[in-house]
Image (cartoon, rainbow, N blue to C red):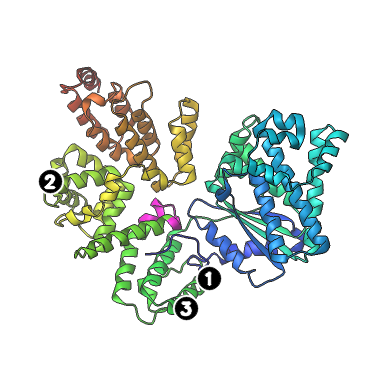
Amino acid sequence: MWNDNETNSDFIDYQHLVNAVTSIVNNNSLLPCSIGVFGDWGSGKSSLMKMVEETYLEDKDVLIINFNGWLFEGYEDTKTVLMGRIVNEIIKKRKPQDKALKIAAKLLRKIDLLKIGQSAVKHGAGFMLMGPAGLALTTTSDVLGKLSNANYEDYIKKQNENADPDEILKNDIQEFHLAFEELIEETNIEKIIVFIDDLDRCSHDTVIGTLEAIKLFLFAKKTAFVIGADERLIKHAVRRRFPEIPGDNTEVGRDYLEKLIQYPIRIPPLSDLELTTYVNLLFTNLYTDVGEFEHIRIGVLEEKNKDQFGFTFRLENAGDFINEVNDDLKEALLLSAQLVSVLAVGLNGNPRQTKRFLNTLLLRHQMAKSKGENLDKRILAKLMLLEYFKSETFKSFYQKQAKNQGIISELKLMEEVVLKDDEEKFEELSVEYQSYLQDSWIRKWVSSEPNLSDVNLQSYFYYSRDKLSVSGTNIQRMSSQAQDLYIKILNDSETIRTLALKESGSLSDGDSSAIFESLADKMKNEGEQSGESPTIKRLIDFCNVRNELISQLLSLIDKLPHQVLPLSINTWLLEISEGTSHQPTVIKMVQDWSLSSTNKRLAGIAKRKLKSI
C-alpha cells in the first residue's frame, strides 16, 4: 500500500509546473507576488508545493514558511495568526539584534492590537466605549495577562487625536507594511516564500481572512506567497462572505480572486496515458527496491518528456527500465491495464482518489490472505469498480450471491447477452437486470475480463462489508464541488436546486455516483416520501441530468416498499424514461404498482397511467 500524504517524489511529471512557480519566485522584478496552485481535491497541490519548497531548502538566504490555516481555525483570527506566524518565524530563524529586534517587537505589538480589534467585534460595548481597558470587563484572565505586557499609549493617543476609525486602520496597515519591509531588510533575508495549504478545509471566513492578510499587511518587497486551493472553493467563499455584492455569483468570485491571486497555475486532471504511467509507477514502487525504483522513476519520466503525447509506461516496455520484472509486478501491471481506462473517466484523472481505490483493493486482498484465502486481484478489482460506480447493482449482486452460495446466476445470462449477442436471453432476465443492461457502462463492465458467471463470489463480497454496512462515507469521497452541489440539491429553493442540477452535468462519474449514493441513503433513512419535492424527487431530477445512473435509480426504487412511494412516482419515472431504452422497464414497474395491495391510491394512479400509454 502507499502513503496517502503529500510527497516530494514525482510520479506524474510535475516538473513543468514546479518550473512555472519557481520562474515567478526567482524573478525579483515580479516580487511581491501571490501564486495560486489550483486543482481539485486530491489533484496533487500539496505535493507540487512540497516539490517547489525542496528547490529552496539549501539556500540560506531564502526563508521558507509553511502555514496551514485549518490548524488554527476556531482559535484566533486568521489574519493575526498568519501575520504572527511569519514574524515569529523571522525572529526564530534569523535571530534579529538591535534595530531588527526593535522592529520585530513593534510588529508583534501591532499584531496584538489587531487581535484586540477583533475582540471588539466579539465583546461589543466593553471595547467600543473604553478602548483596550474596556476589554478587561469581558475577557478571561489569560487575555488580561497578555494585555498587561503591551504598551497601548500610542493607541489611546490615536483614538483621542483622530476619531475616524477608517483613517486609523489605514495608518495601521501602512505602518505595519513599512515595518515589515524594514525587518526583512535588517535581517538580510533575500526572499521570503510562504506556502499556504489546506484552504480547501477552511471556513469561508478563514479563506477570506488568509487572503486579505496577505494583500493588506504582508505584501512586501521580497515576499512570495504560494497558495494551494480548489479555485471553486475560494469563489464560493467570496460569495458566502459578501452576499450583498451585486452580480452573478461566478463573476463576483472570479473578480475577487483575480485581485488577490496574481499568477494562477492550474493542475489538470491526468489523461489516460498519464494515469497509466502514474499507476504503473505506484506498483513498481511497491514491488522493487527503493534504490532501484528511483532510477526507474527518473528513466520513465525522462522518456515521457521525449514523447509527451505518445509514451506510457506499461508491462510491454517495463523491461526497458527494470532489470527484472518479478511475478508480483507483472500481475500488478496486468491489473493496471484492466483498471486504468475506467478509473481515468470515473475518477476524472484524480491521483489521490486513484491511490485510495488501489489501497482499498490491496487492503482487502491482504485481509483475505491473513485468513488463508488468496483472492484473485483482478476479480476483486472488477467487483470494486462496480461497487464504486454502480452501487445499486453491486448491492443487488451481493444479495443474490448470499442466497445462492456465492453464485450469481443472472450474471451468466448477462454475459451471454453481451458477449454472445444472444438477445433471447435478455427476455429471461428480470426487469431489474434488464434495466442494468440498458446501461452502457454495465454492459462494458460485464464484457470485461475476467468473466464472473461461474465464480464463487462469497469471499469477495465478504471483504466488501465495510462498504455495505457504513453509510455517510460517500460525502468523504466527493470533491468540494460535488459536496457543494449535494447541499444545493437538498436546498428548499427551487432556483438553487435548478442551478445545481445544471452544474451537475460537469461532475466526474465518481462524484455523480457519490451524490447518488448520498441521496439514496438519505431517502432510505427518511422512510415515507411525501411533500411536493421529497428526496426521491431530488434523486430523480439528478438522474435526469446524469442519465448513466437511471438504471441504478430504477433498481433502487423497484426494491422500495409500495407504501413509502409518493403518488407522483408513476409520472416522474414515465417522464424521465420516455423515448429511452429504460421505458419498457418503467412500464413493467408501473404494472407492478397497479396491482399493489399496500398502497391502493398508488395502484389506482398506476392503472390510469397504463391506459394512457
Where is mark 2, residue-wise?
A: 403
User: In the figure, 111 relative to 103: above or below?
Assistant: above
Instruction: Label 1: state its secondary structure.
Output: helix
How many other residues sit within 10 Å of disc 3, few (<14), some (14-19) or many (≥20)?
few
Q: Nearer the viewer, residue 517 or 142?
A: 142
Quarter of the picture holding the C terminus: top left
Residue 109: x %, y % from top left: 76, 49
Q: Residue at x 35, y 60 (%)?
A: 358
Q: Nearer the viewer, mark 1 or mark 2?
A: 2
Where is mark 3, residue-wise?
A: 295
Residue 215: x %, y % from top left: 72, 48
Instruction: Label 3: state its secondary structure.
Output: helix
Magenta-highlighted residues: 342-352
Q: Nearer the viewer, residue 100 or 78?
A: 100
Q: Amino acid at mark 2?
A: Lys
Residue 536: x %, y % from top left: 33, 30
Overall secondary structure of the magenta section: helix
How many other residues sit within 10 Å of disc 1, few (<14), some (14-19) or many (≥20)?
few
Q: Amino acid at mark 1?
A: Asn
- The answer to if 277 sits in the magenta stretch is no
